[in-house]
Image (cartoon, helix red, strand yellow):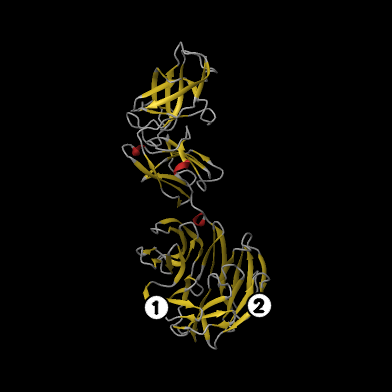
Amino acid sequence: MSDLAYDSVRNRFYVSVPSGSSRPNAAAESVVAVDASTGAMLASVNLGSKPTLLAISDDASYLYVYLSGASAISRVALSTFTSDLQITLPSQANLSWMEVMPGSPKTLATAQQAGGTSGTGGLVVYDDASKRPNTAAGAPARFLFTDPGTIVGGFYSNTLQSWKVTASGVSASSGTLAAYGMPLAYGDGWLLCDNGQVTDLSGARAPQQIDYGGVGAFAPGRNRLLMLGTAPGASSVQLGAFEDVSMTALGRMVAAFPYNPYPTPAIRMLVWGTDGVAFVVNQQLFIGHTELAAAPPAISAATIVNAASLSAGSISPGEILSIFGTNLGPTPGRPLEFSAPRQVSTDLGETQVWFDGLPGTMVYAGSGQIDVVAPFGLAGKKSTRVQVWYQGIPSAIIPLPVSPTSPGIFTQDGSGRGAAVLNVDSSLPGRPAPAGRVVSLYATGGGVTNPPLADGQQDIYPVPLAASVQVLLNGSAVPVLYAGSAPDLPAGVVQVNFQIPQDFPSSPSATVQLSVGGVLSPSGVTISTK
């Protein structure tokens, strides 16, 4: 196997099988169609001697196959998976690369090297089997279209040049762009070369350098670049993901197969479907799914809310937040775990939430929801930047305002109505709660304690809040006996013990609000009294 192409319309791969003995599931000198979902071989076609390079049109109507043993290119109509056209190349010409023009499935650009000598031959464009009259001398070893009218190609001397494509053919090169390497992929305004250099051809952004080279591809719409290759001196191949603005390294994995770039290097890697990668290495086709290629976690300011009140807005140190979105964590979800005795972990199911450079304490992680405690280190800040990471891939950064307190009361069923009220010994007070009884409500967003608690700490001792606290029943303040951390629960949960006045009237829905540092919890929470 030497090259591959992906058909997004039919969800299948096409793989060229070169000369030599037949493979276990594919005859030599054939092109094989492989089901992307199952890996099963669907069909094969013999087009001629030594099929190698492949190029597929962007509408998946045609596949072009270079027959290196016949100095020809066969075009395959993918609707029938049969050859419908053959392009005869000049005698002794070798094809170093070919690409279908974007938006023009019957137009093929080729780099032809006379006798296999680098720097001779030229760029030739065909419409069906008709050659456009103008050609460009000096065939690049590899090239790609950055738009339908521009070709960028690289030479073995590591110089990069560009050409214009017109109705009459290819114009002369506009000159050397720089010494980059072989162009592999173009996406999000970046050009990737095989030496790991990433360049904005417009010059608007400074070039970036990945720490290893190989083959790579951009994941459309995911602001991500994937690279398959080796670092200098490394003996194994790595698959890495990079954020495509700053080229920050994201996740990385070491492949479980030996990698020998000679004599059959990987010449192409494809990103396909929602999280797929595919490549040919050591004469073998690898098709797989990886979180490195998957969509990033998706969140917004409106979906980051107080876990008790479900209200969005300003957040506070130690506040338990619920973050809703997609691709946030594992399925099924996972409850909190301990990284040390009485210390809740900041990494749960490969999910982390960062507030600037501070990790949040993870209470729950699932694909659609995260519950996390904001770090106490936010105290004194006016704003923070929140970002979710799942399996090494980050979400967008969401700026949020920070305030000292932002109280919200937990309710019995999460509806925001009936408060979760207990006796001070944690037993149920009964319904309704008797007048004169001391009861406890649970909340979050109370801010820092005095003395301060550590992030993720599960303290066995009550520690009071630093801010002043009031409980309002039907708008009137009632006696507060304690307001602070909740023993045996993670830091961030606030327990408030208060007394229902002896003369408080019986009510099925008395309103209850919590004021911490002068900030009131949202209205609408009620308790039943008698």
Earlier along the polypeptide chain: callout 2 or callout 1? 2
**Cβ–Cβ below 8 Å for labels 2 and 1?**
no
- On the image, the x and y values in percent for residue 472 come to 42, 21
- How many marks the image carries: the answer is 2
- The answer to whether residue 308 is left or right of residue 246 is right
The single residue placed furthest to the bottom in the displayed view is 91
Amino acid on which disc 2 is placed: Asp
Numbered disc 1: secondary structure: loop
Q: CA distance from mark 2 to mark 1?
A: 35 Å
Residue 203 makes an appearance in the image:
yes
Q: Decide if residue 369 is on the left or right side of residue 11.
A: left
Residue 260 in picture, x, y percent from top left: 48, 70
The answer to whether 314 is drawn above or below residue 507 in the figure is: below
Q: Left of 331 or right of it: where is 162?
A: left
From the viewer's side, name the closer residue of 473 and 184: 473
> Dot 2, crowdedness within 10 Å: few (<14), some or many (≥20)?
few
Q: Amino acid at mark 1?
A: Ser
Residue 174: image tag? 1
Q: Residue furthest left?
A: 380
Relative image position of residue 72 (x, y in whole percent): 58, 82
Residue position marked by numbered label 2 in the rendering:
84
User: Image check: 367 left or right of 179?
Assistant: right
Residue furthest out toward the front = 167
2 vs 1, front mark: 1
Residue at left offset 38%, top offset 58%: 246
Quadrant for the N terminus in the image: bottom right
Q: Secondary structure at mark 2?
A: strand
Please tell me how crowded label 1 is: few (under 14), some (14-19), or many (20+) other residues with Cα within 10 Å: few
Q: Residue at x 41, y 22 (%)?
A: 471
- Estimate the x, y position of residue 370 in percent, counting from the top left: 49, 41
104 w.r.t. 413: above or below: below
